[in-house]
Image (tube, coloured by chain):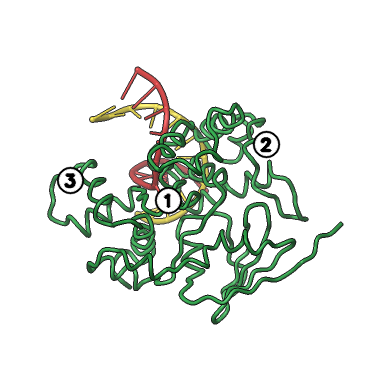
Chain colours: A green, B red, C yellow
Amino acid sequence: MVSPYSHLTQRVNNYDLASTLNSGQAFCWNLIGPNEWSGWVGRTPVNILRGVDCLRVSGRNLSREAIARYFQWDVDLSAITGTFPDDPSMRKALAYAPGLRILRQDPWETVANFICSSMKQIVQIKQIHIALRERFGVEVEPGHHAFPSWQQLSAVSENELRECKLGFRAKHLAMAARQLAAGEVSLEAIESLPTAEAREELMKLRGVGEKVANCVLLFAYGRLEVFPVDVWVERAIRTLYFPRARKLTDKRLRRFVGEYFGPHGGYAQQYLFHWIRTAGGNGK
DNA sequence: TGGCAGGGGTTGA
DNA sequence: TCAACCCCTGCC
């Protein structure tokens, strides 16, 4: 039986869909027309269109609740950005993409994506993501393969994963899937843990260090205070906030970002990262 | 067209 | 603290 194709329309203001889908937090979205993207919410393939004052989502068997949660369109963005520190760089980053949101993605898909992200650029991460879907995912609609679950990937060999251009990350992903299958870590249980303990649990997974764990906490578990520091952000923080510091240890930098950027530091980080990466940090 | 450097990180010694 | 891990992209 073919499930019904439907549309959902949500009135929004201050939602920058392009920046949100193109800011290195999700890897399953493709631009298919002016202001229109094709991608996934969990195991549901959807298209989303940015209208003048609304978002229009189309797909089969849409759940408004699941879509709203993924796109976080009910979130009061000004209440979040209002807690950001008021300094020249932060103001420029905010002005550059004022409606940028942090999505709420599936934990396993996020773990897998970020295990694959190490030493890779966004284009390459997307290629790996697509290869994993097409090779191992279930075809839920003609031509649309859902991202493979950890149950599915736990039965896949390291060599088969290597064929998806994972390189040395193949071993990490295969082992992480097997650890989940063996019950060593529960992604569901992490939902209710305090952030520090949740991070420790995630870091038990092979291929998940502090940076990847922080990305998963921020993009999948909604821990908006968590501030992942990668080489882009590190460079940006050093240039923007410590231009004259010859010696700024990693420890001091981490303490600074944890304290300075406040209760939604992860959100602030996403604005800075997107601005630095796409505008070069010069406020274009 | 080919050679080379370097990349959004983790692991293990 | 640091090399090793794969291999793709961008640049010359």
Instruction: Say which element carries label 2.
Output: helix
Residue on which the image places disc 3: A248
Residue at 38% across, 40% down: A196
Looking at the image, residue B2 lies above or below residue A242: above
Residue at 45% across, 50% down: A121
Instruction: Say which element carries label 3.
Output: loop
Image position, residue A8 (x, y; %): 66, 71
Is A128 left or right of A202, judged from the image as shown?
right
What is the three-letter code of the residue carrying label 3? Answer: Leu
Residue on which the image places disc 1: A223
What is the three-letter code of the residue carrying label 2? Answer: Gln
Residue on which the image places disc 2: A152
Are the residues under marks 1 and 2 on the same chain? yes
Q: For mark 1, does the 10 Å Cα neighbourhood hold few (<14), some (14 to 19), or many (20 or more) residues?
A: many
Res A30 → quadrant: bottom right
Of label 1 and label 2, which has the lower sequence position? 2
Of label 3 and label 1, which has the lower sequence position? 1
Q: Which is more toward the observer, A56 or A174?
A: A56
Instruction: Tell me, yes or no, whether the two marked residues, 3 and 1, touch with CB atoms within 8 Å.
Output: no
Image mark for residue A147 = none
Q: CA distance from mark 1 to mark 2?
A: 27 Å
Q: Which is more toward the observer, A275 or B4?
A: A275
Is A257 left or right of A187, judged from the image as shown?
left
Image position, residue A42 (x, y; %): 63, 53
Looking at the image, residue A93 lies above or below residue A244: below
Residue at 69% across, 44% down: A137
Of label 2 and label 3, which has the lower sequence position? 2
Q: Chain of mark 1?
A: A
Q: For mark 2, does the 10 Å Cα neighbourhood hold few (<14), some (14 to 19), or many (20 or more) residues?
A: some
Q: Chain of mark 3?
A: A
